[in-house]
């Protein structure tokens, strides 16, 4: 099996049961980014816990209007950063966050960069004390809605399909 085929198989496997999908209630931080390359968006929520005097990531979740690769990378990345400090998580670049899926095909690198961007957007404001979870819309859907616009939900995929 070639590298690209292995990558596709791992993406499909991650998509079959995406981990940490959805809004995280009581998140300590949230970051949202859009890709200038494809127009997709991804939001990540992060919650911390104290572990032996260290503040580590207790859980991270995501929502996205993004491609399958972005969903798969976000799924493995949210698992990868659990238990890490902010500094440790920020040391992971897009390739490291996507590492469980194998090397990224060149056309998919920006999908992992979308995940890295959302993570940095969530974690950087915290260190500079600029994070304000309450100031952002709780869901991506609400980010796109103007006042008085009836909500429309788009189901990208369910775990039962
Ligand atoms: Fe847009 Fe993958 S094509 S994130």
Image: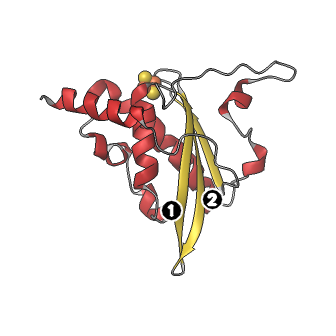
- The circle on residue 55 is none
Residue nearer the viewer, 59 or 160 = 160
Tags 1 and 2 touching, CB below 8 Å: yes
Question: For the residue carrying disc 1, how many other residues have a C-alpha within 10 Å: few (<14), some (14-19), or many (20+)?
Answer: many
Judge from the rendering whether residue 16 lies leftward or rightward of residue 6; answer left or right.
right
Q: Nearer the viewer, residue 19 or 81?
A: 19
Q: Residue 88, image x and y in percent?
A: 42, 63
- Looking at the image, which residue is at 55% across and 41% down? 62
Q: Quadrant of ligand 1?
A: top left
| Quadrant of res 101 | top left
- Local SS, label 1: helix
The residue beneath circle 2 is: 126
Where does the image place residue 123, in percent across and percent down from the top left? 56, 55
Is residue 42 something that shows in the picture?
A: no
Which of these two is toward me, 90 or 12? Answer: 12
Please give the label number shown on residue 86: 1
Instruction: Indicate whether 82 appears above or below 97.
Output: below
Going by the picture, which residue comes out furthest to the left? 1
- Indicate the quadrant where residue 144 lies: top right
Q: Quadrant of the N terminus?
A: top left
Q: Residue at x 44, y 58 (%)?
A: 89
Farthest right residue in view: 148
Residue 11 position within the rendered picture, expressed as x and y whole percent measured from the top left: 33, 32
Label 2 CB, ligand 1: below 8 Å?
no
Q: Residue furthest bottom?
A: 52
Please provide percent x and percent y for residue 152.
72, 19
Q: Judge left or right: residue 72 versus residue 43.
A: left
Secondary element type, mark 2: helix
Outermost residue, front direction?
160
Residue depicted at 50% across the width and 28% down the height: 35
Q: CA distance from mark 1 to mark 2?
A: 9 Å
The crowding category of the residue bearing disc 2, from other C-alpha atoms within 10 Å (few below 14, some 14 to 19, many at least 20), is: some
């Amino acid at each position: 099996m070639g590298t690209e085929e292995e990558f596709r198989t791992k993406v499909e496997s991650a998509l079959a049961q995406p981990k940490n999908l959805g809004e995280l209630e009581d998140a300590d931080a949230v970051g949202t980014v859009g890709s200038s390359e494809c127009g997709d968006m991804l939001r990540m929520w992060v919650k911390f816990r104290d572990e032996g005097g260290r503040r580590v990531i207790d859980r991270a979740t995501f929502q996205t209007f993004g491609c399958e690769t972005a969903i798969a990378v976000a799924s493995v990345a949210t698992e990868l950063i659990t238990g890490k400090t902010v500094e440790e998580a920020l040391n992971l670049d897009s390739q490291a966050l996507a590492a469980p899926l194998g090397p990224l095909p060149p056309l998919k690198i920006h999908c992992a960069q979308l995940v890295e961007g959302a993570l940095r957007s969530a974690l950087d404001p915290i260190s500079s004390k600029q994070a304000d979870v309450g100031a952002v819309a709780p869901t991506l859907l609400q980010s796109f809605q103007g006042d008085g616009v009836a909500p429309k939900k788009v189901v990208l995929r369910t775990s039962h399909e």
